């Protein structure tokens, strides 16, 4: 049984066209999944359903076998999911340490150091960090949260190529070493190659491009 199961998942904004059209997929803990697809194909819509920010028009999402609607979307959002966004979404009047402390009672510094930030950087205002460093803080916050699923919506969209590779490697390590289920939306076929499973979202269907885990 996967940690996330999508069953006949469909979504429509206007009741005419389905952005998502009967998706059946299982995702497991300890793996990184990449979702590729052109702008407007429904990637963000899919992540928002997985994150319990919205409800499907049809079908269901199971978390460890239980329908997230029945368990409660608020609980699902709080306990199961952490988001990483293209725009980092840090609290910008706080330091990295304070941002990480929002999701954990454990000491924040080890999470930040693990992601390559120095003690000094961890105490700086986040706006005085580079984009790559800010995204490391966002990932540290996600890892500190204990949520078993990380949903990353184009997390490297604003970063240079080397930093993007690095951030993708860190997300992959979160899956392989910490057992997270990491789902990353990207435009980059190159970055997607790091994933265990690559999906392409096309006409509302999620097609497996490669499954390196099998
Ligand atoms: N709130 C909304 N209301 C109506 N249509 C929307 C809304 N959000 C997104 N869409 C449409 O749904 C489709 C999928 O959007 P989105 O999930 O954001 O795609 P992607 O993330 O792949 O670029 C697009 O055609 C978009 O215009
Ligand atoms: Mg999007």
Image: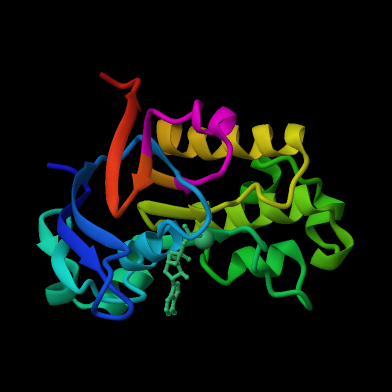
Q: Is residue 109 visible?
A: no
Please state the horizontal and vertical placement of residue 10, each as a whole percent of the image.
Answer: 21, 64
Q: Quadrant of residue 160?
A: top right
Asked if residue 107 lies in the magenta stretch, the reply is no
* Rendered-image quadrant of the N terminus: top left
Q: Which residues are magenta?
A: 184-199
In terms of image quadrants, where is residue 75? bottom left
Q: Please, is residue 144 above or below residue 184 in the view?
A: below
Is 88 drawn above or below residue 180 in the view shown? below
Q: Quadrant of the C terminus?
A: top left
**Residue lying at 10% horizontally and 55% vertically, measured from the top left:** 65
Question: Could you tell me which residue is drawn at 73 percent across and 52 percent down?
Answer: 158
For the residue pair 36 and 172, the one nearer the viewer reads as: 36
Which residue sits furthest front?
16
x and y, in percent, of residue 29 in the image: 29, 41
Q: For this view, does 144 lie left or right of residue 69?
A: right
Image position of 129 with respect to 214: above or below: below
Q: Residue at x 60, y 68 (%)?
A: 101
Q: Is residue 114 visible?
A: yes
Residue 70 lies left or right of residue 147; in this view the side is left
Report the front residue among 149 and 10: 10
Residue 207 horizontal/vertical position (percent): 28, 38
Examine the structure image and report whether residue 189 is included in the region drawn in magenta. Answer: yes
Across and down, in percent, residue 147 comes to 39, 58
- The residue under the point 76% across, 74% down is 92
């Amino acid at each position: 049984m996967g940690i996330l199961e999508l069953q006949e998942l469909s979504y429509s904004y206007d009741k005419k066209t389905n952005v998502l059209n009967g998706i059946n997929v299982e995702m497991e803990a300890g793996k990184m999944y990449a979702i590729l697809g052109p702008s407007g194909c429904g990637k963000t819509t899919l992540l928002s359903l997985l994150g319990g920010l919205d409800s499907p028009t049809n079908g269901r999402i199971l978390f460890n076998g239980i329908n997230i609607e029945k368990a409660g979307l608020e609980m699902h959002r709080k306990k199961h999911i952490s988001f990483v966004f293209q725009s980092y979404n840090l609290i910008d009047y706080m330091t990295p340490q304070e941002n990480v402390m929002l999701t954990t009672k454990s000491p924040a510094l080890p999470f930040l150091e693990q992601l390559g930030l120095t003690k000094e950087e961890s105490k700086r205002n986040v706006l005085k960090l580079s984009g790559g460093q800010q995204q490391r803080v966002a990932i540290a916050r996600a890892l500190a949260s204990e949520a078993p699923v990380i949903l990353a919506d184009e997390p490297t969209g604003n970063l240079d190529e080397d930093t993007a590779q690095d951030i993708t490697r860190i997300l992959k390590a979160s899956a392989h070493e910490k057992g997270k289920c990491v789902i990353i939306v990207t435009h980059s076929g190159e970055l997607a190659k790091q994933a265990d499973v690559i999906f392409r979202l096309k006409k509302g269907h999620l097609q497996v491009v490669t499954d390196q885990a099998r």
